[in-house]
Image (cartoon, rainbow, N blue to C red):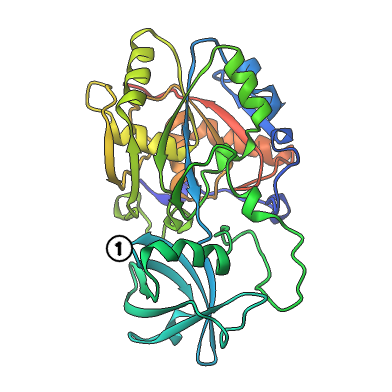
Amino acid sequence: MKVELFDFELDKDLIAKQPASPRDASRLLDLSEEKVINDRHFYDLPQLLRKGDVMVFNDTKVIPARLYGKRGEALVEVTLYHPDDGISWWSFIKNSKRLRVGDEISFYTADITAEESDFKATVISKNEEDGVLIKFNENPERLGKQLEKYGSMPLPPYIKRDKPLPGLWNPYNDKEDYQTVYAKHEGAVAAPTAGLHFTDRLLKEIDDMGVKRVFLTLHVGAGTFLPVKTEDTENHKMHAEYGVISEETCKIINQAKKEGRRIIAVGTTSVRLLESAADDKGVLQPFCGETDIFITPGYKFKILDMIITNFHLPKSTLFMLICAIGGTERMKQAYQHAIAEKYRFYSYGDSSIIKCINKI
């Protein structure tokens, strides 16, 4: 399938630099009915739900996986995306051409210079496909604390933030904003952004109306931001991500499906893990491992009835996924409506709810 089929134009002014406040004040494009488009706000979501629906949330927690470092006089920006072991990570590095195997990177913050730093990493290997493998000078137990001290949230490249400089005031609160209110299991290096719109108040309202909430965990990788560089989708390689679905979550979802109740996934990450764990008969199985599933139009969904999701990049794997869910032409029309109505796009932007029209 040609990647060009999933292209569209977007005014850069529509790319959100920070989230709505409060979170559920964001807008919601309602595509829950075929051939109908309604403009709502996210706090209207309960009006679109039914008693007995099952909502599936990804409870991964984002770690501060962006680091600013120095090797000699060369400045580098490191984004961790996949652990190799307890102290080694594959990473994407800006200015990586200045690095060689064996080089040591010293990390810094606005308050700690590279020369004063006690947090370092050594370059282990490099390749064009996987990026750079670095090994930290820490034990696994201490590494998390050092990331909290030196790291920042790994925002996608279209959200610009200044590098840490002494005395520079930061008006943003990304360590709180780029995390869902129900985040639990550390390991993601990108947020499951569909969940950023939920507040504790809204979740209580959903619970009170008899909607069941269940959780799975998919540790989202920075590979989710990588552009599709091939001309055909068949030639694109997805980066693997680690996920877990419990036996209890499977029981709840499978029972709901037997009874004809709807399964509503919160985010593309939830969809990808659900579909990875479903068997050919549409029964969800417990899961613990990595998935590199790549869903494009023509795929028949085994679990999904609806999805709540943000607006995605043109020609991205995520836009291809929602085209598979709602239909390519339907999604292109919906995006043109959202652009005309000046919805806010991407990770900190507005949301949508889409009915799945392609099921087994």
Tell me what residue is drawn at x 71 percent, y 36 percent. 26
Quadrant of residue 277 within the rendered picture: top left
On the image, the x and y values in percent for residue 18 come to 70, 51
Q: Residues within 10 Å of mark 1 (few under 14, many from 20)?
A: few
Tell me what residue is drawn at x 27 percent, y 40 percent. 288
On the image, the x and y values in percent for residue 237 come to 32, 55
* Tally of numbered discs: 1
Residue 298 visible at all:
no
Q: Residue furthest left?
A: 280
Viewed as shown, does residue 310 lie left or right of 100? right
Question: Circle 1 sits on which residue?
Answer: 85
On the image, the x and y values in percent for residue 149 come to 57, 67
Residue in front for this viewpoint, 241 or 342: 241
Residue in front for this viewpoint, 98 or 245: 245
Tell me what residue is drawn at x 75 percent, y 73 percent. 168
On the image, the x and y values in percent for residue 293 come to 31, 43
328 to 46, vertically: above or below: below
Viewed as shown, does residue 108 lie left or right of 358? right
31 to 161, vertically: above or below: above
230 to 106, vertically: above or below: above
Tell me what residue is drawn at x 34 percent, y 24 percent. 248
Quarter the C terminus occupies: top left
> What is the secondary structure assignment of the residue under circle 1?
loop
| Circle 1: residue type | Asp
Residue 99 visible at all:
yes
Quarter the N terminus occupies: top left
